[in-house]
Amino acid sequence: MIEFWHWWVIAVALAVVEIWAPGAAFLWLGIAAGVVGVVLLVYPGLGWEGELLLFAALAIAAVLAGRAIYRRAGLHAAPNHLNRRAEQYIGTLHTLETAIVNGHGRAHVGDTSWTVQGPDLPAGATVRVVAVDGVVLKVEQA
């Protein structure tokens, strides 16, 4: 027969799995297992079928509640610019270091200088990044 403390051991094991494989899925399953342990502590006569049914219901409810909490808190993935660093600059304003002549120039972006393409403009002009082509920022006059 499954005792209440078995469920607590399962809850701790699921929490440990959550540490090694983060993603908040095992966290909610562990919480459900812990609650089943508490229920068994209060109502020890519940059979193993009832325990598993209770765990299944609580696991589903806990996962759905967790998803709602993360959605409400706005904890969704940020745009991934890994290996596409220049895309984060689309829509931002920058100052030209060198004039854009024949469509090419350089702009001060952050703590570095980037090659830009756009309409001919004098050095010191403010430009807005509208697109990215590899490591070249496409700009327009701001």
Image (tube, grey):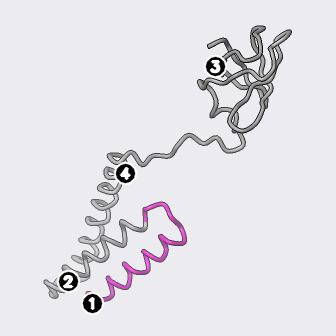
Separation of marks 2 and 4 at Cα, in angstroms: 29 Å
Q: Three-letter amino acid code at disc 3?
A: Arg
- On screen, 40 above or below 137? below
Q: Earlier in the sequence, mark 3 or mark 4?
A: 4
Q: Three-letter amino acid code at disc 2?
A: Leu
- How far apart, in angstroms, are the residues tagged by discs 4 and 1? 33 Å
Where does residue 104 sit, x and y in percent of width and height?
A: 83, 16
Q: Which quadrant would the C terminus be assigned to in this image?
A: top right
Task: Reply yes or no: does residue 20 show up in magenta.
Answer: yes
Kind of residue at disc 1: Glu
Q: Position of residue 122 (x, y in %)?
A: 77, 11
Which of pointers 3 and 4 indicates the residue nearer the eye?
3
Which of the two discs, 3 and 2, labels the residue nearer the N terminus?
2
Q: Secondary structure at mark 1?
A: loop
Tag 2: Cα neighbours inside 10 Å, few (<14), some, or many (≥20)?
some
Q: Which residue is mark 3?
A: 128
Question: Which badge, 4 or 1, comes first in the chain's sequence?
Answer: 1
Q: Amino acid at mark 4?
A: Tyr
Magenta segment includes 28: no
Residue 40's tag is 2
Q: Secondary structure at mark 4?
A: helix
Q: Are marks 4 and 1 in contact (CB under 8 Å)?
A: no
Mark 4 crowdedness (10 Å alpha carbons): few <14, some 14-19, many ≥20: few
- Circles 1 and 2: CB atoms closer than 8 Å: yes
Labels 1, 3: front one: 3
**Span highlighted in magenta in the image:** 1-25
Q: Going from the N terminus, do you reach mark 1 or mark 3 first?
A: 1
Mark pair 1, 3: CA separation: 65 Å
Which of the two marks, 4 or 1, is nearer to us in this view? 4
> Which residue is denoted by mark 4 in the rendering?
70
